[in-house]
Image (cartoon, helix red, strand yellow):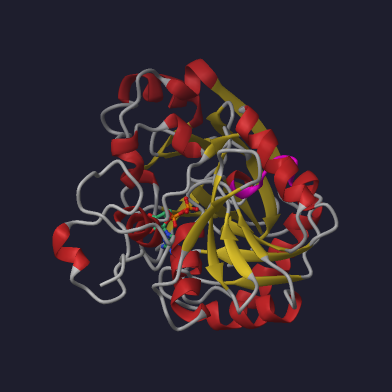
Amino acid sequence: MGELKCIGCGAALQSNDQNQPGYIPESGLMKEDAICKRCYRLKHYNEVMDVDVASGDFLTMLNSLYETTGVIVKVIDVFDFNGSLVPSFNRIVGDKKVIAVINKLDLLPKSTNRKRLIHRAKHMLKEAGITAVETVAVSALKNDGVDELVEVISKYSSNQDVYVVGTTNVGKSTLINQLIKRSTGDDNVITTSRFPGTTLDLIDIPLDESHFIYDTPGIVVPSQMAHYVKPKDLKYITPAKEIKPKTFQLNPEQTLFIGNLARVDFTGGRRTSFSIYGCQHLTIHRTKLERADEFYEKHYNTLLGPPELDESLLLKNGKDITFQMNEDSDILISGLAFVAVQSGAEVTVKVPDGVEVSVRPTIF
Ligand code: GDP
């Protein structure tokens, strides 16, 4: 019998040394279409290394992508729009076509108007300097909208490779796993390659006989709320299922705390409603504006937590941003919450210094 090869990377399969190419536990060798442990892990966990925007690797990645031809699929977390934006994105893209994918649609209430969401997303992308040929909303997790995305990808990718780009946690791997399932009908075919001259991993998934979908490394950006929260506590701020808004009627000079990570001060206007769309585990607490600092200092790790903070973050390292609502609007606190506020209100939002806050006409 000839030497068995991994159907993923082509390495000769062996069960002797875990650290050498082609390793597979002995039991796996018996199987048809055997795949080595590394390819198995890549396939199931998409373990492509993430890179920090401050690192040399990031610049290398930018340059390598710039030099390729292909179509870019830019994945955006619907719940963390600003944290999804890749710095220097246009330098990556060059003149390649961009398909924008708004992911994690399942987190928004079912009643959300998808068309309106896409319309707003396009506008926000444009403001960020990103021009997409098409914008598609999906839930990679629930496999919703992925068929439409596949059609759009085929429409624009004729005879070209496809590169999936995004910051960490936007759902690239989840989406790619869905695409793997469909692309060839044979979800075993997956190989790894590298940008020429670098150590950055790519995963290529055959699109057809001669073209591939590449999973690029995720990009870590400091504006993501996740930087302020201990990994064990991410579950308290990251919604895992459809968000149910919590609505409060506020008088001016009242404050809402969104956990211990943000604070919304209602500074001017008539009594009005504030709806918070965020993770169900976040404590929303109402208090008087004049008492808010004192309250936070006393309760940031008790009444307002978890997550657990090392210091009174908003007081020690917070910034204020003030908005005057000229129409019904959503305040986007990147990675933490949307706050739907009615026209006429003046609102000041306090967040950790690096976190992005923006406003758009409401989608709710
Ligand atoms: P990557 O870092 O961009 O590759 O992101 P992952 O695919 O690893 O996903 C990051 C987190 O977001 C994981 O906890 C996923 O389960 C979750 N996630 C990915 N796609 C979706 C989605 O469509 N809906 C929801 N609710 N969660 C998602």
Q: Which residue sits at x=73%, y=70%?
A: 160
Q: Residue at x 79, y 44 (%)?
A: 91
In the figure, is residue 51 to the left or right of 20?
right
Quarter holding residue 123: bottom right
Q: Is residue 130 above or below residue 310?
A: below
Give x and y (percent) for residue 147. Answer: 55, 83
Query: Any magenta on residue 176?
Result: no
Magenta stretch holds residue 86: yes
The answer to whether 357 is drawn above or below residue 147 in the figure is above
Image quarter where ligand 1 lies: bottom left
Relative to residue 153, is residue 191 depicted above or below?
above
Residue at the spot 45% in from the left edge and 22% down from the top edge: 313
Q: Which residues are magenta?
A: 84-89
Residue at the outermost front position: 1
Which SS does the magenta portion mostly show?
loop
Report whether residue 225 is seen.
yes
* Residue 362 x/y as whole percent: 65, 62
